[in-house]
Image (cartoon, grey):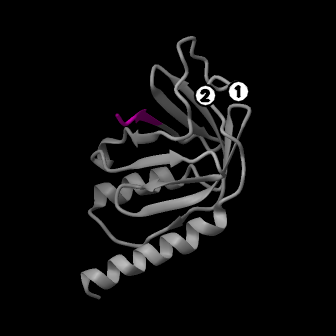
Amino acid sequence: MDTQRQQRRRTLVAAAVLLPLVAACGGERAGAGRGSGSAEAARPLTGVRWTVALPEAGGRAHLAFDGKGTVSGSLGCNDVGAGATVRDGHITLGAPATTRMMCEDSLMDAERTLLRLFGGTVAYRIDSGNLTLTSENGTRVTAFAAE
């Protein structure tokens, strides 16, 4: 498949995945729920591009919560989108929809780690500009706000 067709296909897949997921969940801010724990002016969870701190992702993985019921971003190689309901220091993440490219092993390892966050509830905490997500299955991921 040529590069233009791949890009067009990725765009269509992303649109088909993300458009139906738009649902209101409010503009939650860190500090509003039990999960923040920070005494400083709280950085919001929504409207921020969070760069995932997984060495194997090489700085490519990131997530963004839109405050309208979705999370989107990159797992390091593939794009991801899912429903995301933010409430009381927790985020309920729906099943992920991803593009399906193959990348080098380290990026695929990072993706497997990040995918364990989806399809359940994760606790979140924002402290000193860092976001920590902890899933019910014990997966813990830290991210920092991209400037």
Q: Position of residue 103 (x, y in %)?
A: 29, 66
Please name the predominant secondary structure of the magenta segment in the image: strand
Query: Is residue 90 found left or right of 106 in the rendered image?
Result: right
Q: Which residue position holds label 1?
A: 33
Q: Residues within 10 Å of mark 2 (few under 14, many from 20)?
A: many
- The residue drawn where x is 63% and y is 62% is 95
Query: Is residue 85 found left or right of 41 in the rendered image?
Result: right
Query: Is residue 66 found left or right of 113 in the rendered image?
Result: right
Q: Position of residue 19 (x, y in %)?
A: 60, 67
Q: Looking at the image, which is closer to me, 42 or 125?
A: 42
> In the rendered structure, which segment of residues is drawn in magenta?
142-147
Quadrant in the picture for residue 83: bottom right
Q: Which residue position holds label 2?
A: 30
Q: Position of residue 99 (x, y in %)?
A: 44, 70
Quadrant in the picture for residue 45: top right
Q: Quadrant of the N terminus?
A: bottom left
Tell me the SS state at disc 2: loop
Q: What amino acid type should be assigned to the residue bearing mark 1?
A: Gly
Q: Quadrant of the C terminus?
A: top left
Q: Are marks 2 and 1 in contact (CB under 8 Å)?
A: yes
